[in-house]
Structure formats: C-alpha cells, structure tokens
C-alpha cells in the first residue's frame, strides 16, 4: 500500500543515504528535517557523515513509499494492541522488503 498522508510538520524532510566506502552499496540511514538541501546536507553530515565515503540527501516528497499493511494494523491483520510487538525489536518495526527487524529510528538492520 502506498503511504500518501502528509506529515503534520511542514518543514521539508530529507532522506539520507550513505556509502561507507567505494565497495559498498548506498544504504538508507535516516531522515532529517531542514528548509533546504544545504541545511539537510549539514545536518546529515553531522549525524551520519563521519563514516561516509559518499553521502546523499534527497527530498522525501520525491521518494515513493510503500507499506505492506495499514498503519495501526498488526502483521496478522488484527488491530494493533491485540498482538504483542515483535520480540526482535522494541517497536515491532520490520523491513517491508526483507521482513528483517529494523531499528525504528534509522532503518538499519538490528544487531
């Protein structure tokens, strides 16, 4: 299902991708809110860039987002709260593409 509802905050959101070295693929590491690409780059660099060979920021509005289920719906289709959160993570977040547990703040695979 495509997520189309706008956020309450009107400050533009920027998705952050990084590559730690030339041999790695880009990976999504998080998001920042900033009024411009330059400010987004500064924020992303201070938060994530210390390990980056390459750092990309792109407007979140230009990223098409998909989810497997309705917000508030558990994996089995029941309302949230009727089933315990996934024990693999604190917040029950899972990657839609792989089904692997992710860190709810950064989207990185849990360790």
Image (spheres, rainbow, N blue to C red):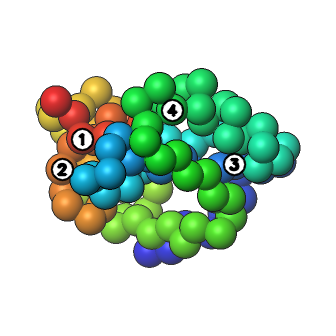
Among the 4 quarters of the image, the one containing residue 70: bottom left
For the N terminus, give its image quadrant: bottom left
- Residue 100 numbered tag: 2
Mark 3 / mark 4, whichever is N-terminal: 3
Give the image location of residue 81, x and y in percent.
33, 39
Q: Which residue is mark 1?
A: 109
Mark 1, secondary structure of its residue: loop
Q: Which mark is residue 13?
A: 3
Q: CA distance from mark 3 to mark 4?
A: 17 Å
Q: Callout 3 environment at 10 Å: few (<14), some (14 to 19), or many (20+)? A: many
The span from disc 3 to disc 2 (Cα, nearest Å) is 25 Å
Q: Residue at x 67, y 31 (%)?
A: 43
**Is label 4 or label 1 in front?**
4
Q: Earlier in the sequence, mark 4 or mark 2?
A: 4
Q: Secondary structure at mark 3?
A: strand
Q: How many marks?
A: 4
Q: Earlier in the sequence, mark 4 or mark 1?
A: 4
Q: Nearer the viewer, mark 2 or mark 1?
A: 1
Residue at 84% x, 44% y is 35
Mark-to-mark CA distance, 4 and 1: 18 Å
Label located before the other in sequence (3 or 2): 3
Query: Residue, x 50% and y 67% (percent of image)?
Result: 65
Task: Give the x, y percent position of residue 111.
Answer: 16, 30
In the picture, measured across the screen, residue 89 lies left or right of residue 107, that is: left
Gap in angstroms between the C-alphas marked 4 and 2: 25 Å
Q: Please name the residue that numbered disc 4 is placed on.
A: 49
Direction from residue 31 to residue 36 in the image, left or right: right
| Dot 3 and dot 1 residues touching (CB under 8 Å) | no
Q: Could you classify mark 4 by the number of other residues whose Cα lies within 10 Å: few (under 14), some (14-19), or many (20 or more)?
A: many
Q: Earlier in the sequence, mark 2 or mark 1?
A: 2
User: Who comes first in sequence, dot 3 or dot 1?
Assistant: 3
Q: Are marks 4 and 2 in contact (CB under 8 Å)?
A: no
């Amino acid at each position: 299902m495509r997520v189309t509802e706008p956020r309450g905050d009107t400050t533009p959101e920027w998705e952050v991708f990084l590559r730690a070295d030339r041999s790695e693929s880009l990976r999504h590491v998080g998001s920042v809110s900033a009024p411009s690409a330059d400010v987004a780059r500064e924020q992303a660099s201070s938060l994530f860039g210390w390990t980056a060979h390459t750092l990309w920021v792109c407007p979140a509005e230009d990223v098409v987002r998909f989810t497997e289920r309705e917000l508030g719906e558990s994996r089995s289709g029941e309302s949230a709260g009727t089933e315990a959160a996934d024990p693999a993570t604190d917040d029950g977040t899972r990657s839609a593409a792989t089904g692997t547990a992710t860190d709810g703040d950064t989207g990185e695979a849990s360790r």
